[in-house]
């Protein structure tokens, strides 16, 4: 039997989508109101307000990109789980070609995810310097500005422009937390790509491996897939409430959730909701995947209907 060469197990442990989801939601909620600052009283304050709004919008766009990365990882996990699901005899040339194509698809997805994750990191790399500069440049501007208490609600709060810089600086610890997890995601995507590509740049062909090894790798990819779904269930609230501010990632995930809902309804109709656990797929992984799908389906059904 022929199996794809498997990455070392330790690399999977770098991925912590649960912590990334929490940091993503908190970071977005803290930054979003500052992208909607309004100057109401001073011509002098106008350039500073425009600068703050543009800077924060760049960070919001980077968060949107980060959410896209996890969606790409989800797509990658589907390909990978299928890749390691069924062995192909070495005499099955067509089967081996299909496996090779799936490997190459994983590399393409990993490269796309890595580039987007690096893009997010590149934007947030300057956040500390940007916020301290904003604080320094506005500390003497006592103009009144308006800021939404919640970007999804019409209520506006009045504040002094000179207080905005310190407010932004006070969030640097949280943003550092988000940046660290985003950097880990970029590292993981790079590791996946490098574990499949040989030194000469070619994709490593399927190699002989044990059934146990294939089952182990497949179960890890199934966990990645379930973690991606749970990640989305955790950040879907900000996507539902602020979809206009996170347009690309929202559209990507909503299409996926719609497909999942359809597939889950069809599976329930055909099986009565009973799971058939085949060899090599542990009860824990199977349950985790189903729980993630049900959680996501229930969480998103209302918003999709609207």
Image: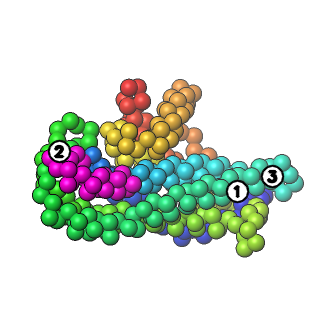
Circle 3 SS class? helix
Asked if marks 1 and 3 touch (Cβ < 8 Å), the reply is: no
- Mark 2 closeness class: few <14, some 14–19, many ≥20 residues within 10 Å: few
Which residue is at a point 27% across and 55% down the rendered structure image? Answer: 47
Residue 70 image offset from top left, x and y in percent: 49, 52
> Residues in magenta?
37-59
User: Marks 1/3: CA distance?
Assistant: 10 Å
Asked if marks 1 and 2 touch (Cβ < 8 Å), the reply is: no
Q: Nearer the viewer, residue 279 or 257?
A: 257
Q: Nearer the viewer, residue 1 or 92?
A: 92
Which residue is at a point 61% across and 59% down the rendered structure image? Answer: 111
Q: Is residue 279 visible?
A: no
- Mark 1 closeness class: few <14, some 14–19, many ≥20 residues within 10 Å: many
The scheme the figure's colours follow is rainbow
Circle 1 SS class? helix
* Sequence-wise first label, 1 or 3: 3
Q: Is residue 20 left or right of residue 113?
A: left
Q: Which residue is mark 3?
A: 97
Q: Is residue 116 left or right of residue 163?
A: right
Q: Is residue 186 visible?
A: yes
Task: Classify the position of the N terminus by image quarter.
Answer: bottom right
Q: Is residue 46 magenta?
A: yes
Q: Residue furthest front?
A: 43
Q: Which residue is mark 2?
A: 40
Magenta span main SS? helix
Residue 224 image offset from top left, x and y in percent: 51, 55
User: Marks 1/2: CA distance?
Assistant: 56 Å
Measured along the vertical axis of the image, is residue 296 above or below residue 63? above
> Which of the numbered marks, if any, corresponds to residue 103?
1
């Amino acid at each position: 039997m022929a199996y794809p060469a498997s990455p070392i197990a330790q690399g999977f442990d770098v991925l912590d989508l649960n912590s990334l989801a929490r940091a993503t939601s908190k970071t977005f909620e803290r930054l979003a109101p500052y992208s909607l600052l309004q100057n109401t009283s001073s011509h002098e304050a106008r350039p500073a307000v425009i600068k703050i709004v543009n800077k924060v919008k760049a960070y919001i766009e980077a968060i949107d990109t980060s959410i896209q990365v996890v969606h790409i990882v989800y797509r990658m996990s589907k390909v990978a789980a299928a890749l390691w699901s069924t062995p192909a005899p070495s005499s099955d040339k067509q089967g081996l070609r299909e496996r090779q194509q799936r490997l190459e698809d994983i590399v393409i997805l990993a490269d796309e995810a890595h580039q987007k994750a690096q893009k997010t990191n590149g934007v947030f790399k300057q956040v500390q310097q940007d916020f301290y500069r904003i604080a320094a440049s506005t500390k003497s501007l006592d103009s009144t500005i308006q800021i939404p208490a919640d970007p999804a609600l019409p209520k506006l709060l009045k504040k002094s422009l000179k207080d905005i810089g310190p407010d932004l600086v006070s969030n640097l610890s949280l943003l550092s937390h988000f940046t660290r997890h985003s950097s880990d995601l970029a590292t993981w995507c790079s590791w996946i790509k490098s574990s499949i590509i040989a030194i000469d740049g070619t994709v490593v062909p399927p190699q002989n491996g044990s059934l146990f090894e294939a089952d182990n790798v497949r179960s890890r990819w199934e966990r990645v897939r379930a973690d991606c779904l749970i990640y989305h269930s955790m950040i879907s609230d900000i996507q539902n409430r602020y979809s206009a501010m996170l347009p690309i990632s929202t559209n990507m995930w909503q299409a996926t959730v719609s497909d999942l809902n359809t597939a889950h309804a069809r599976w329930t109709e055909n099986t009565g909701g009973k799971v058939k656990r085949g060899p090599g797929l542990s009860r824990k992984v199977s349950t985790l995947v189903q729980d993630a799908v049900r959680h996501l389906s229930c969480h998103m059904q209302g918003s999709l209907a609207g």
